[in-house]
Amino acid sequence: MNNITNIKIRIQTESVERGGTVKIPKPTVKRLGLYYRCLSNYRESGVDFVASQDIAEKLNIKPSQVRKDLSYFGEFGKRGLGYDVKKLLNEIAHIIGVNKEWNVAIVGAGNLGSALTSYPGLSKHKFRVVALFDNNQQKIGKKISDITVYDIRDLEKTVNELKIDIGVIAVPESAAQHVAELLEKSGIKGIVNFAPVRLRTNVPVEDVDITLSFETIAYSIVKKSPADLLDTSND
């Protein structure tokens, strides 16, 4: 098995260091998750071997990109056969850390936080939401999708008791930095941040800006058909 224990992912940088020597582009790290899902589907369909061309067609990328991404972590393919689906799936699982179950806490029991507790994709990929946190006394002690809402003042104690690895910030922008500091102090190993603000913290952070995604697709539409999208706001 390849030496994967030395891979250090620094989410807030533009690249990732493997073994302290090879810098892996952040887009490559993100595509590993896509490869994992694609290979999982192949395994469930009973496919034993796939070529880079097969994976590329499923993900609408170039075969050379698949080969380049995987080459950062070792040699996996066999000439004439392609990639062993089960073996490569296990290797990628180790690389991206989904060979184990991760306990997750969500801070913010509003609409977004509540929705995330019932999202089946998390548990399917071994991210188990075990706690919600809020400062609203009317919510504390209640359950949302069978997940207890804890007082934010009990964050550190609950993180230790439930062995929580990942914190999710689902609070307004004005409160996000303070929550990040509380999560770091509690011993959380990583943060997924839904607030539209750049956090200052020493733990890995993955920013998820939903509005930015809409703005990006809007730009792509405007760029493609500018004449059809005249500003009518003043009509």
Image (cartoon, rainbow, N blue to C red):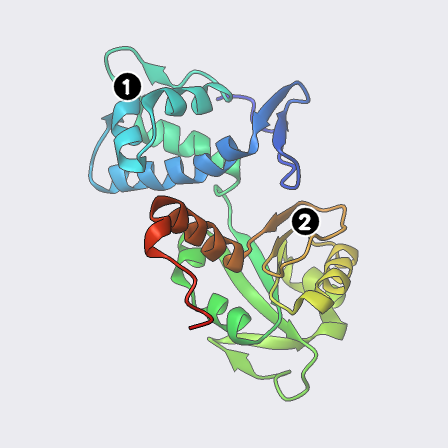
> Does residue 181 sit above or below 134 in this rendering?
above
Q: Earlier in the sequence, mark 2 or mark 1?
A: 1
Q: Pick the residue in front: 172 or 161.
A: 172
**Residue at image location 46% in from the left, 52% down from the top:** 126
Quadrant hosting residue 82: top left
In this rendering, is residue 222 above or below 5?
A: below
The correct choice, above or below, for 211 with respect to 201 in the image is below
> Looking at the image, which residue sits at the far top?
79
Q: Amino acid at mark 2?
A: Lys
Which one is in front, 148 or 227?
Answer: 227
Q: Nearer the viewer, residue 13 or 161?
A: 13
**Left or right of residue 25: residue 8:** right
Give the image location of residue 116, x and y in percent: 49, 66
Crowd tier of the residue under label 1, counting other residues whose Cα lies within 10 Å: few below 14, some 14–19, many 20 or above: some
Per the model, the C-alpha gap separating discs 2 and 1 is 36 Å
Where, quadrant-wise, is the C terminus in this rendering?
Answer: bottom left
Residue at image point 48% right, 41% down:
99
Under circle 2, the secondary element is loop
Q: Position of residue 53 (x, y in %)?
A: 27, 24
The residue under label 1 is which amino acid type? Gly
Image point (33%, 31%), residue name: 86
Q: Could one spot residue 82 in this view of the protein?
A: yes
Which residue carries the number 1 mark?
Answer: 82
Q: Percent from the top left, x then y, of residue 149?
A: 60, 77
Q: Quadrant of residue 5?
A: top right
Considering the numbered disc 1 on the image, is that residue within a helix, a strand or a loop? strand
Mark 2 closeness class: few <14, some 14–19, many ≥20 residues within 10 Å: some
- The residue wearing badge 2 is 189
Q: In the rendered image, is residue 51 in sight?
A: no
